[in-house]
Image (cartoon, coloured by chain):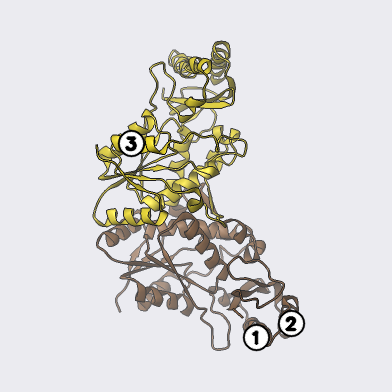
Chain colours: A yellow, B brown
Amino acid sequence: MCMAVIIHDVAEMQTTASRLRSAGKKIGVVPTMGFLHEGHLSLIRIARQRADAVITTIFVNPTQFGPAEDFSRYPRDFERDSALASGAGSDYIFAPETHAMYPEGFATFIDVGRLTTALEGKSRPGHFRGVATIVAKLFHLTIPHVAVFGQKDAQQVVVVRQMVRDLHFDVDLIVGPIVREPDGLAMSSRNTYLTKDQRKEAPVLHRSLTMAAELIRKGERSCEKVIRSMSHLISSASSGVIDYISIADGATLEEMEFCADGRPTLISLAVRFGSTRLIDNTTITI
Amino acid sequence: MCMAVIIHDVAEMQTTASRLRSAGKKIGVVPTMGFLHEGHLSLIRIARQRADAVITTIFVNPTQFGPAEDFSRYPRDFERDSALASGAGSDYIFAPETHAMYPEGFATFIDVGRLTTALEGKSRPGHFRGVATIVAKLFHLTIPHVAVFGQKDAQQVVVVRQMVRDLHFDVDLIVGPIVREPDGLAMSSRNTYLTKDQRKEAPVLHRSLTMAAELIRKGERSCEKVIRSMSHLISSASSGVIDYISIADGATLEEMEFCADGRPTLISLAVRFGSTRLIDNTTITI
């Protein structure tokens, strides 16, 4: 295995990317907050197939965390991440310092409008402003032809897609499927926060999504009823406290009253286990 | 004279710019709202000296106009603009349609923070949000190495510079000096709105700026006193209604109490002649 080139400096990243472009290389980027797991690695492998030069960015972005959120305790392990990203096929790892990305006097933010106030945005005000801003910054520094995001953060994909379209970023977005543990729990860096008991309970999130999709496929059309069943399952089978369960138009994120009207439908949820907030989702079209 | 290639289509502009880049050409862009005058042409000539391929964009950007402002009556003359831009050395003219730049569902805006609420931003809320957003869009579509802006819109330069820095746009900003009529009036597409009498009075704006710079150079240190003298001159010599007169730090746009403390100092103003709002400025460092 060849170790990826590690770049910390912002200007060096941009110069390197620019040089790769001039040499006719196709650049693929995988933006991450590090503490990589199989989900991230699957995205790096997708980028590997699509690009000549794969850049994995590792940056725990402070502007997408709320003041009461887990920015400071978010798990970090750069050595391990470098080895894993290299093993999955990353040519470059871009890991800038916080003060280089947000120097004193930093003032510019990108707001993607209505899409950012639904779902996660309702529970995490300002989150997607931070996401959109850091993604734009990383795009300018890595100048990718292709960027790979995970479907686990479904709303992030929708928000970034809207920004790319509205601001004419010349980037192809590729979305990698959710990677799950054998018991169905969606992989997440935050899973490490879970106690042993919480970890045992957490797969109920995926079970509730599977059940919802099944109910709809079998003919249930009331989103309210489906959500009630999911809520009941989660509450009865775990200590999880539901933040939201949503059945929404997969493109506009508008809540749907009737499931399965031909539109891609995003069933998503956020549930707290103690202070750990997990999200998961599935998409169906009927 | 060789006529510039005219591009209306957004995708065609991006493909063309991308092709120029791949061919190793240095791209210079001059963003304008059209109705070109000698001020714009001087910027195109600067770009001509700095770049292999010069793109002049002509787009009256609705998002930088307030609801009560002059978007619909803003002067337009595409034929004349094309000839003038070509004559000044533009290789390409990019003139997109409004609905292509702001299609249905458009939702993304760039906010450059505190800088945008001073001066023009105070009188024109939302103006710089529109400016920053359209400039980012045009940068993505024309992929310039160099972008040339006019010092006439002094705050625009400061705002765009902050955005370029914060979002890591790989673009060199060049600022062209204000071009004036023989009697000192700063060239502006809006000068065509002036009645004959207003046109005669309007050079008082430049005279007031020159006087302010002179007062400061001669030792006056109270910004308040300088502003009072400017205000007196404008009011006594014209029918202009002062929107604001400001003496501010040229970089942060913070109002200064004492002039000439070694910082570049921006003396700027906005004055209405009837329904026509004119701006002008000068910068001094003492």
Q: For the point 60% across and 76% down, which residue is it?
A: B280
Name the spot of residue A42 as percent of width and height, x first. Answer: 33, 31
For the C terminus of chain A, the image quarter is top left
Q: Amino acid at mark 1?
A: Arg
What number is the disc on residue B193? Answer: none
Q: For the point 37% across and 55% down, which residue is it?
A: A12
Q: Nearer the viewer, mark 1 or mark 3?
A: 3
The residue carrying pointer 3 sits among few (fewer than 14), some (14 to 19) or many (20 or more) residues within 10 Å by Cα, namely some
Say if A260 sits above or below A15 in the image. above
Q: CA distance from mark 2 to mark 3?
A: 68 Å
Give the number of callouts: 3
For the N terminus of chain A, the image quarter is top left
Determine which residue is flagged by label 3: A83
Q: Nearer the viewer, mark 2 or mark 1?
A: 1
Determine which residue is flagged by label 1: B217
Residue A44 visible (yes or no): yes
